[in-house]
Image (spheres, helix red, strand yellow):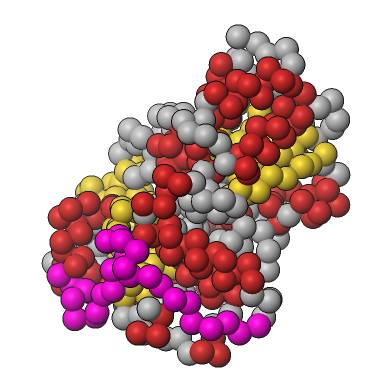
Amino acid sequence: MPCSSPKELSQRLSGHFPHVPTRGQERLIEAFPRFFFSDKPKCTLIVKGYAGTGKTTSIGAIVRTLIEIRITFIILAPTGRAAKVMASYSGITAHTIHRYIYRSKTRSDGEQGYTLAENKFKNAVFIVDEASMIGSDSGLLDDLIEYIFSGKGCRLILVGDGAQLPPVGCMTSPALDLAYLKHEFNVTAAEVELTEVVRQEMDSSILINAHSLRLGIASAEPGAKVSAPKIDIDAGPDVIKLSGEDLQDTIETLHGKYGEDGVVIITRSNKRAVLFNQEIRKRILWQEDDINIGDRLIVVKNNYYWLREYEEIDDELIANGDIVEVIRIADRFERYGYEFAEVDVVLVDIENSPKLSLTVMTTILNDNKPSLTMDENKELYKKIADDYIDLGSKSKIHSAVIQDQCYQALQVKYAYSLTCHKAQGGQWSAIILDHGYITEDMMDREWLRWLYTGFTRAVKELYLLNFNHKFF
C-alpha cells in the first residue's frame, strides 16, 4: 500500500521494529521519511552503526517498510560473502556491487574489461551494506554513485560501521564520510549514527568486548599510541583464550561443529595466513598436494574470462574476494615458470552455483604476495606471446594471449586463514583471531580497529590465539 505522508511513513517504519527503538533508531525513524520524500537531487542517507547497536534490525525494518509501500529497492554489498550475510538477515537477495553495476566489455586492445551498466530503475532505493569497505582510489565509489543517480528519482542508503578497518590505503572510509560525499559528489546527504547498544545484544560477550574496543577507538587520537585493551573473558562463554598447543584440537572440534566454511583464522599478514593455511591443510585436512578436491579457495584478482559461457550466472565476473570450492581436478601442469591446475569449482557464496570448469594458478597458493605483481603479469604475457609468434601480426598474437588459459588462470589463495581485510564484510560461526607479533609501540588506533573488525566477524565463538595476559 502506497504511503502519502512523512508522518505515516514514520509510523509504518516504527511498527517494523521488533523491540522498542533506541534513541539512535528513533532518529532514523525521523530521518528516513525526510530522505524518502525529499525532492532534492541525489538524495543519500548514511546509516552508521557499531556492532550490537541494531544496525541490521534497522535496515530490516526499512526493507519491510519499502515492501509494504511497494517501492522498488536493491540491496548491494562489496563482496559475495557480505551480500550473503545481508541476504541471510534481510531475507532478500543481495548482490555484489561489481556484479550489479558493471558489464563486461572487450576493449579496443582486445583485453576483456568492464563498463558501467545502465540504471533503468525509476524511484528505486539502493541500500549498500558494509559501505566502510568501499574505496575511492579504485574508482568504485565514483562508479557506484554515478550508476545509482543516473536512474530517474533513485535514492541511496549507505550502511556501515565506521569503527571497522577503512579500505586499503585509506585513513577513513570515504563512503561513510558525510563531508567527503557532499564535496566530491554534490549529493544531498544526511547521517544517522546508532551508538546505543541494543539490550538484546548484550547477551553476547563478543559484542560486549567489541563495544569496549569501539569506545577505545573513539577516544584514541590518530597516530597516537594506546594502552593494551582490557578484554573481559568473564563477560560470557563466547570469548575464549587459546594457546598455540591447543590450536589443532580446537580447529578440528570447530570443523566438526560448524563445518570448514563456518570457521576461519584471521591474522595480520599474508605471510602468516599462508603458514596457517599450510598447517591446516597438512595437519587437519590431511591434504598433501597443492590443490585437492574439497579445497576452499579465495579469489585474489578479478577475472572476467571464465563465466562468459555460463548462462546460469547473469554476469561475467569472478570477483576478488569470492570463495570457490574445488569439486574436481582434471589436470595439473607447469608452464612459463608457474604451476596450474584444470579444475571444476562452485562459487560458495552464490546460491545454486553451477559447476564451473576453469584453470587456476596454483603457484600463488603458497606465495606470500597477495597476487601476481604488475611486472610478473607483464612477464607472463611476454612468455605466452612468444608461443604464438608464428601468428605474425601483433593483434593476432595479442588476441591469442588473452584467450590463453594460463594468462587467464584464476589467481587464488586458500580460504582457511585470511587477513582481516579479506575477511571484512563476512561472518563466520567461529573465528580464531591471531594478532601475530605485537609490541606496545605498534598499538595505536588503527590496531584497535583491526582488533574490533576481527572481533565482529564472529557470530557464536571467538578464540584469541596466544594473546598476552596483559590484554585481560
Between 182 and 277, the one lying in front of the other is: 182
**Can you see residue 247?**
yes
Residue 391, position as x, y percentages in the image: 54, 55
Left or right: residue 354 versus residue 114 is left
Residue 92, position as x, y percentages in the image: 46, 29
Per the rendered image, the range of residues in magenta is 224-249
Residue at image position (54%, 43%) is: 55
Q: Is residue 232 magenta?
A: yes
Location of residue 51 with respect to 30 vertically, above or below: below
Residue at image position (15%, 70%) is: 249
Residue 128, position as x, y percentages in the image: 60, 41
Left or right: residue 49 versus residue 156 is left
Q: Is residue 150 magenta?
A: no
Residue at image position (66%, 28%) is: 125
Residue at image position (86%, 52%) is: 183
Location of residue 367 with respect to 359 vertically, above or below: below
Between 140 and 156, the one lying in front of the other is: 156
Q: In terms of image quadrants, where is residue 223?
A: bottom right
Between 445 and 124, the one lying in front of the other is: 445
Q: In terms of image quadrants, where is residue 30?
A: top right
**Can you see residue 300?**
no
Question: Which quarter of the image is occupied by the N terminus?
Answer: top right
Question: Which quarter of the image is occupied by the C terminus?
Answer: bottom left
Residue 330, position as x, y percentages in the image: 23, 51
Location of residue 404 with respect to 216 vertically, above or below: above
